[in-house]
Amino acid sequence: MHHKATERLKSLIDELTKELYIVAAFIDEIESGFISPKDSSLLTLKKLVSFLHKEYKSKIPKIDIQHSILHVISEFIMERFIEKSGFISSILSEHDTNSLKEILADYFSNESREFIADYPFPCLDNIKELKLDGVNIYQKSYTSQQYNTTRITFSGTGILSNSLNSIASRNSLRGYKAFVMIGFLQKLFTVDESSSDIYSGDFPKPQTFQCLPLTMKDKKYGFIQDNLALKLDVSDFISRIKIKDNYDSENFPQLFSDKMSTATLLIKHAENSNEDAVRIVSALDWAFDCKATKNLEMAFLNTCFGFESLLGETGDEKIPLTEALSDRCAYLISKTTSDRKKVKVHFRKIYQLRSKIVHGKTNYLTEDQTETVDLAWAFLFASLVCEINLFKNTIKGESIFPENI
């Protein structure tokens, strides 16, 4: 943020701390990240929100910015155990008011704040603690639910919000999904198809299934968002993931660490905007959604979106998307000319079916079409394996091109 913008930010924060009125009746809700500003102070809050929304080039929704402002103030007040109504400048000392203004100015001067996201992953209960490159695994106890579960922490950047739709949440969740899918690609995980607690992919069984909790914490100030939870279908899918039976539990932590180094490598380079890593992680995100959803049509479309993320655009308007993708997929996963021809024929069938669904010619897949759905997933799975291996070789400096190119 340039000098003039920083000065404007400080001015708006100064105005806000003078006019924002905290209602004591809502103090108990501070732990959930909420305070209630009096209506008369909303105009000042909206001015600050609109200013930041413009400075962030509209990348962060206004509602997320507003929530983040109130959450930072809530955390600051909660730390001081203040439980009374009043203007901020009247319930805080002059020193604390100035400290709050400095924190707000620092916190919102950059939309790419570093945070830690803490996700559940119950199937790793035989790993008490494990540190990978940028990813930590540990055990956490939940006294209210009377159970322990394994957690996985990821680093990320963004402004924290109470919504899983915020940019910070989405970026962090994408890394989590990629990590999980690499476990499937490495043949570490399988899914227990018999233990789902969801009816028809839409409704939970009464009082038998809870969405898995997650937390996000700002690295510098320690502000925590702990009122978040994974969506129902994602929670159900994660809860049903199992370690394959053929692995020795005693040696599993080291084996897991070795095999999942691919995931940490990809996530790290994706965070640094490596074009190939971003493309692969995005495809892994769609692959996760394909496996998590109970809706067969959405699972199929997510698989197709995975192809488009992984194999990219045509780069030439004259070349049809299906033709470009089928060529790339065929040459990526096939070794012989005859196999490539077969892949291209089947790939066209996949995209013909995609077109029927997207354009409303069919709403439900028939039993005869499930073979095409299974084939689409097999092609995406194979494509991901090949692309990831190529990426790893490139990172190691093993380029497939001659030095003079």
Image (spheres, grey):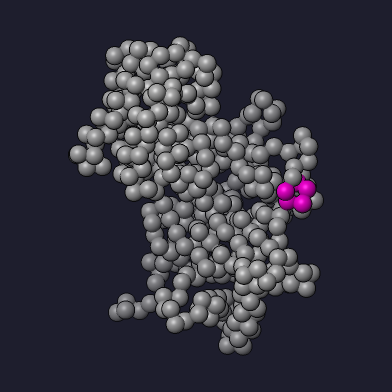
The x and y percentages for residue 50 are 35, 39
Q: What range is drawn magenta here? A: 198-202
Tell me, yes or no, whether the highlighted magenta stretch contains residue 200. yes
Q: Is residue 220 above or below residue 353?
A: above
The x and y percentages for residue 388 are 51, 64
Q: In this view, does 27 lie above or below 220?
A: above
Q: Residue at coordinates 63% horizontally, 83% vertically from top-left?
A: 345
Quadrant (top left/top right/bottom left/bottom right) for the N terminus = top left
Tell me: 195 left or right of 20: right
Farthest residue to the bottom: give it. Answer: 338
Q: Is residue 126 visible?
A: no
Q: Residue at coordinates 50% horizontally, 28% vertically from top-left?
A: 33
Residue 43's image quarter?
top left
Tell me: 230 left or right of 116: right
Q: Residue at coordinates 60% horizontally, 82% vertically from top-left?
A: 344
The x and y percentages for residue 375 are 68, 72
